[in-house]
Image (spheres, rainbow, N blue to C red):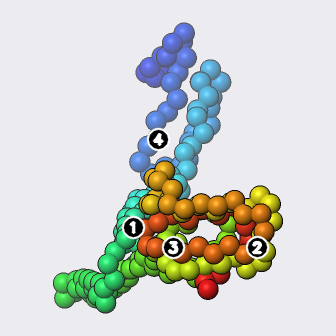
Amino acid sequence: MSDNTPQGEQGQVPPPQPQPGWPPGWQPQPQPGWPPQPPPTDQTTAPPQKPRRWPWIVGIVAAFFLGVGIGAAGSSDTVEPSAETAQPTATVTAAPTATPTVTATATATKTTTVKVTPQPKAAITEGVWLVGEDIKAGRYRTVDTVSDGCYWEITADEGSGDIVQNDLPTGGRPTVSLENGQQFTTKDCGDWARS
């Protein structure tokens, strides 16, 4: 070669560089001895955008705190009865621009739990009963005639071993008088009713 073209490695001529006036994206055809050119990149398409995840994260966090707030408002153990109901209201107003006004209202309901103490029963079934709390004080008699195996007992108070009166009747309809604070035990005697 006798022209002034620079020689590449091992006597190869480098490919020509794009010149002003050439059409966009046009590449000269490779000549024998030139290394292959990489394909032209398409510069008209933008790389794909990653999806925005922060709105989802903010929404999940807000929902979590809203759920915790509602759960905490309804998780009271025992509360004295009250006629009060909390109704907080929050208003957010944007600056006077093209942004609309946003109003958010949250209503919290206060849960009132009332402990209802059951009234003592006027009838007695088999078991252990505290007079004045489980059953009413007074005079009781078995509803039906008892048979062998019936046992009843009155103790001075709950849990004490001080027996005031007891019996193991073999028939008839036994009668007992019970006072507040005593404990009454009945086994295999059937039901008792106030007399």
Vertical position of residue 166 compared to residue 24: above or below? below
As helix, strand or loop, the secondary structure at mark 2 comes to loop
Name the residue carrying label 4.
Answer: 18
Q: As shown in the figure, which amino acid type bears the numbered disc 1?
A: Asp
Which quadrant holds residue 153? Answer: bottom right
Q: Sequence order check: which comes first, mark 2 or mark 4?
A: 4
Q: Sequence order check: which comes first, mark 4 or mark 3?
A: 4
Q: Sequence order check: which comes first, mark 3 or mark 1?
A: 1
Viewer can see residue 36? yes
Q: Where is residue 4 in the image (x, y as percent from the top left)?
A: 43, 21
Q: As shown in the figure, which amino acid type bears the numbered disc 2?
A: Gly
Q: Sequence order check: which comes first, mark 2 or mark 3?
A: 2
As helix, strand or loop, the secondary structure at mark 3 comes to strand
Name the residue carrying label 1.
Answer: 77
Name the residue carrying label 2.
Answer: 172
Label 4–label 3 contact, CB within 8 A? no
Front residue of 20 and 61: 61
- Which is more foreground, mark 2 or mark 4? 2
Q: Where is residue 9 in the image (x, y as percent from the top left)?
A: 51, 12
Name the residue carrying label 3.
Answer: 178
Label 2–label 3 contact, CB within 8 A? no
- Which is more foreground, mark 4 or mark 3? 3
As helix, strand or loop, the secondary structure at mark 4 comes to loop
Label 4–label 1 contact, CB within 8 A? no
Q: How far apart are marks 2 and 4 (CA)?
A: 124 Å
**Which residue sits at x=42%, y=68%?**
181
Q: How far apart are marks 2 and 3 (CA)?
A: 19 Å
Q: As shown in the figure, which amino acid type bears the numbered disc 3?
A: Leu
Q: Which residue lies furthest to the top in this view?
A: 10
